[in-house]
Structures are given as structure tokens and as C-alpha cells.
Amino acid sequence: MFDEMRGSGDAVRPAYAELSQWLAEVKPDVLDFRRREAELLFRRIGITFAVYGDPEAQERLIPFDVIPRIIAAKEWETLRRGLEQRVKAINAYIKDVYGRREILKAGLVPEDLVFQNPVFRPEMNGQKVPHDIYVHIAGIDIVRLDADTFYVLEDNARTPSGVSYMLENREIMLRLFPELFSRYRVAPVENYPDELLETLKSVAPPSASSEPNVVLLTPGVYNSAYYEHSFLADKLGIELVEGRDLVVKSDVVYMRTTEGLKRVDVIYRRIDDDFLDPLVFRPDSGLGVPGLMSAYQAGSVTLANAVGTGIADDKAVYSYMPEIVKFYLGEEPLLKNVPTWRCREDEHLAYVLDHLEELVVKEVHGSGGYGMLIGPKADKASIAAFRAKLKSDPKNFIAQPTLALSTCPTCVDEGIAPRHVDLRPFVLSGRTRTRIVPGGLTRVALKKGSLVVNSSQGGGTKDTWVLDN
């Protein structure tokens, strides 16, 4: 198992040298006091998330670990180039699937994986989007196995969340640990809202004014990520709107204001496709805007991310990403995929059924750490239940080896101990450039031995420091 501070041995890795020395100097009671102070600050700010179906704790505080994760500048450069390449390929794939479908004609991706995909949107067939950008904001989940090996664990191409925690984690750390920051040159993340706003403005439709009007569309206060929606709207200096605040007239979207209707050019939407427009998708949706798809198809408004991007981020399509990168870019992928067995294929299914105790099995459309089996940690009853699921509906599952995710020092009740982590950098694709703020959201599995980092499953977060030298 690779520890990011100590490598595979006892010697401290260069990026962590100052942190290791600081941890040796700081008294445990001081660290614990600041840990509790950080929790108090988060409670005062009101950073919570909702857990659906949990009546006892509908609003929770995501645990925050006060020991930062550190990534060397050279390591980050490797990640940055790989992330840019991957998101460029994802955009090309979505354009192709809703257009000429060359990759399907070439037989590299099975047609049923597209056309029978529940998130495939036929309304997008032949639909032009400004500058051919479908995924304006991507969250790419990365795991690390050793000093040189990073894997992409998952692509989030619909409405990736978590960036508010990246920003708030940094603010809390600057406030509580200025002496630790003084030992490092840490690349800033505070400019993310500016970068996001510039990205959104750059993809406004041609009919927009020279200063496009951007709004953030939220499902409302009962959504699990509502804190983030309001936080980002405030940071970007744009209006936070619900479906009832918008109206479509003559295929143009307007926002209701006290001074009358105001045209909207770009909608950063945090609402799933199904609920966007009751005239096209779910007729019972009260969250969307009637006529929005008509305006979108007329080219008078940009939706970020585009409708139908889900065809690029399910876990079955993920397994084809190396081929997708090569097909569209003519390049070898810079970031590896986790080896994946597609249970839809008989040979793969047979292997998975024979090795369930060793593998991680995931639902193709699962998220949040739900609907998965971690074979080495599962009891016989759980394995038997998953075996039955696989046999009855193999297309709904993929399987992967149980990875030895890297660990980072983490402040827990018993002191400082290694805990498994992943990383979600946020990739912004605009008209002329790709922007990636150095860092991202590090999620940490706080339970000893756990590989599940999701907040809904008891995980926490860390500040991510990319060294600026």
C-alpha cells in the first residue's frame, strides 16, 4: 500500500517534508483544538448535505480533516495534461454520438450501449451546441496506486458537485493554519469562481450581448447540494433561480425580475435532464421551465452542461474510454482506466462470478457509493445476493479489481493515522481554452480500512495542496 507521505517505506517524500516536521512539532491537543474549531466554523457557515431517506439526519456536516493532502508540481502537471486530454475526448464522443456516429460505425462502442442507455436523449440528435462543447464542467475522480500511477475511477459529465467544499476547505485552512502555509508555496484555488464565470460567458450563444447574462438553475432548497448552488451563485455574482423564475417567450428564455423580464443567455443548470422541461421530459416536473428545450434547440440559450451528457459517464461507457481517446485524438491515454470487466459480455461475466470475493462490483448507473459490492469486505449473504443480481441483469454491472488506494495522514480520534483518499479535480471547457484549478476535492475514507470515500457513506474531505514550484 502506497502512503503519499512516506511512500512504500519509512522515508518522508520531499513534498511532505515540511508537513512531517510540522506534525512532529505541533502538540496533539493543539491539533485537536483546531480540528474542533474547524468543525465549528463549518457549522456556522452552514455547509451541509442532505441524505435522502434518512429521517434522523437529513442535514449532515461533511467531516473535514485538518491535515492537507500535498501534490508535487510535477505530479500535478501529469494529471493536468491527462485531464485535458480525457475531457476533450469526452466532448468529441458526445458530439459524435448525437451526430455522425462514426465510433458506432467503426464498431468500437456497441450501439445498444448508446441507444438503450436510459440517459440517451434522442432530442439531442443533430442538435448543435455553441462551439461543440457539451461538458463545460467535468469532475474526474482520480485514485493513486503508487508514486507514478494514477487511475481515473469515474467520469462525472452531468452535474458534478463538490467544488464548494474545495473552496471552503482552503479558506478554513488559511484561517486556522497560517504557519503551515508559510512553509509551502501552495497554488491558489480561490480563482475558481472567476474561471468558471469566464468559461460560462465564453460559450454564450452568438445572439447574446457582449456581456452575457448567466444564471444558476437549482431544484431548490430541498436538494442535497443546495448549499453549493447558493454558494456558487454568490461567488460568481449571478442570480440563483428556480424553474418558476424563468419563462420562455418566442424561443427565448427570460428571468422574471422586479423591473420586468430580463433575457438569459447561459444557464448553469444543476437539475437533471428529466426535470428540465415538462413539455419534453417528465410532465410531472415542477422544477424545470416549460419550453426550455425549444429555446435550447433554437440556439438562443446555452445549457451547461448540455442535455444528454450522461451517455459519456456511465460505468460501462467508462470501460471504453481508452478506445474513445485513441479514436478521436489519435493519442494514447495519458491517464489509465482501472481494469474493468463488463458483465454484459459472457466471458467477463463468467470471470466475475468466479471471483466475486476478490472484486468490486458496481451498478452501471450507480453513484454515491450505493449499489456496490466490495468483495473482500463482504459477507457470504451479500456475495450471494450480488451473484443473483449479476445472473438476472448482467448488463447493469461492471466489476473491477480491489485497488490498494493510496493513503494520506489523517487526524482521527486515536491520533494521526493513514486513511484512503481519492481526488476530484474540476475541468472547465470554454470556447478557446480549458481551465483546471490546481487541486480539487480530496475525499477521505475516515473508517479504518475503508475504501469508500463518499460523504453519504461516512467519508470526509481534505484540503488539496498543489505545490507551486
Image: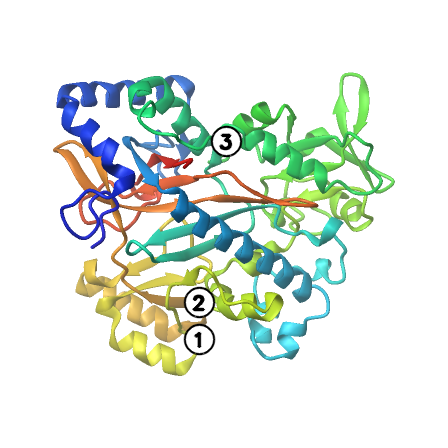
Q: Residue at x 81, y 25 (%)?
A: 261
The x, y position of residue 105, in whole percent, is: 65, 78
User: Which circle's residue, 1 or 3, is located before the other in the chain?
Assistant: 3
- Circle 3/circle 2 CB separation < 8 Å: no
> Which quadrant of the structure image shows residue 46?
top left
Q: Residue at x 70, y 45 (%)?
A: 431
Residue lying at the far front in this picture: please name it: 469
Characterize the local packing of mark 2: few (<14), some (14-19) or many (20 or more) Cα atoms within 10 angstroms.
some
Q: Foreground residue, 464 or 359? A: 464
The kind of residue tagged 3 is Glu
- Circle 2/circle 1 CB separation < 8 Å: no
Q: Residue at x 37, y 36 (%)?
A: 464
Above-or-below relation of 457 to 333: above
The x, y position of residue 395, in whole percent, is: 45, 71
In the displayed structure, does residue 174 sit left or right of residue 67?
right
Residue 47 in view of the camera: no
Q: Which residue is mark 1?
A: 344
Q: Which residue is mark 3?
A: 228
Q: Foreground residue, 280 or 358? A: 358
Q: Which residue is mark 2?
A: 396
> Element under label 1?
loop
- Image quadrant for the N terminus? bottom left
Cα separation between marks 3 and 2: 31 Å
Above-or-below relation of 53 to 240: below
Cα separation between marks 2 and 1: 8 Å
Colour option used: rainbow
Cα separation between marks 1 and 3: 36 Å
